[in-house]
Image (spheres, helix red, strand yellow):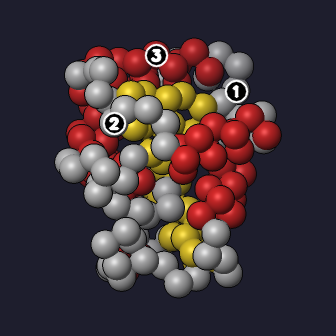
Amino acid sequence: MGFMIKKIVSDGQNGVSLGGLLASADLDIDHSGFVPMSFDTEQGPEDVIMTFQKLLKIKTKDPLSVITKNIAISDATLIMTDGKLTKRSRAGVLQSRLFSKPFFHVDLSKKTDFAAAIGIKSWIKEIRKFLNVSVLNVVGSLESKSPGISERTRSILVMVFENDLANN
């Protein structure tokens, strides 16, 4: 049984979340997600919403509200960090637990990209034994704290899903 992901959910922030959106574009996978009404990435106003037009603005400035809504519309959450969980990433863990949704944390400071891809693929295969997982929320470290993590995330997710597109 393949494990085709049909949609990647993201809050569009620079870093892991943007890497998830970039991978969705590379793989022609649908995307969505909530962003704050006055959406700025950590580097200021960006054209992420223009590029990824299915991101929806909500009336909040609270990042936890955005994280919570994105977890609610997803089947599972992938948290990728460069080191320990940050406050933002810990919120993803907590909200996933509150919604009884599966989550997986990958610390990229301890894994090669290939090992991370294998771990993610194994996790999705395992949870698909019990749940229909087709919408994946992708969150984690910000680019300012972990330079290069957007591209690393993009590359890893492409490794995870590129072969599955041909098999489903």
Give residue 50's quadrant in the image: bottom left
- Please tell me whether residue 2 is drawn above or below residue 34 in the rendered image: above
Q: Is any atom of residue 165 visible in this view?
A: no
Q: Is any atom of residue 67 visible in this view?
A: yes
Residue bearing mark 1: 131
Question: Depth check: 30 or 32 in front?
Answer: 32
Report how far apart the C-alphas of labels 2 and 3 lie in the structure. Answer: 20 Å
Left or right side of 67 for 101: right
Mark 2 residue crowding within 10 angstroms, few (<14) / some (14–19) / many (20+): many
Left or right side of 38 for 161: left
Instruction: Choose mark 2 or mark 1, whichever is in front.
Output: 2
What amino acid is found at the position of numbered circle 2 in the picture?
A: Asp
Left or right side of 70 for 53: left
Residue bearing mark 2: 82
Please report the residue visible at 35 percent of the width from the left and 18 percent of the height from the top: 118
Question: Depth check: 43 or 127 in front?
Answer: 43
**Percent x, y for residue 48?**
36, 73
Mark 3 residue crowding within 10 angstroms, few (<14) / some (14–19) / many (20+): few
What amino acid is found at the position of numbered circle 3 in the picture?
A: Ser
Question: Depth check: 98 or 33 in front?
Answer: 98
Q: Element under label 2?
A: loop
Instruction: Choose mark 2 or mark 3, whichever is in front.
Output: 2
Residue bearing mark 3: 122
Q: Quadrant of the C terminus?
A: top left
Report how far apart the C-alphas of labels 2 and 1 lie in the structure. Answer: 28 Å
Left or right side of 113 for 19: right
Marked residue nearer the N-terminal end (2 or 1)? 2
Please report the residue visible at 55 percent of the width from the left and 47 percent of the height from the top: 87
**Percent x, y for residue 122?**
46, 16
Give residue 44's quadrant in the image: bottom left
Marked residue nearer the N-terminal end (3 or 1)? 3
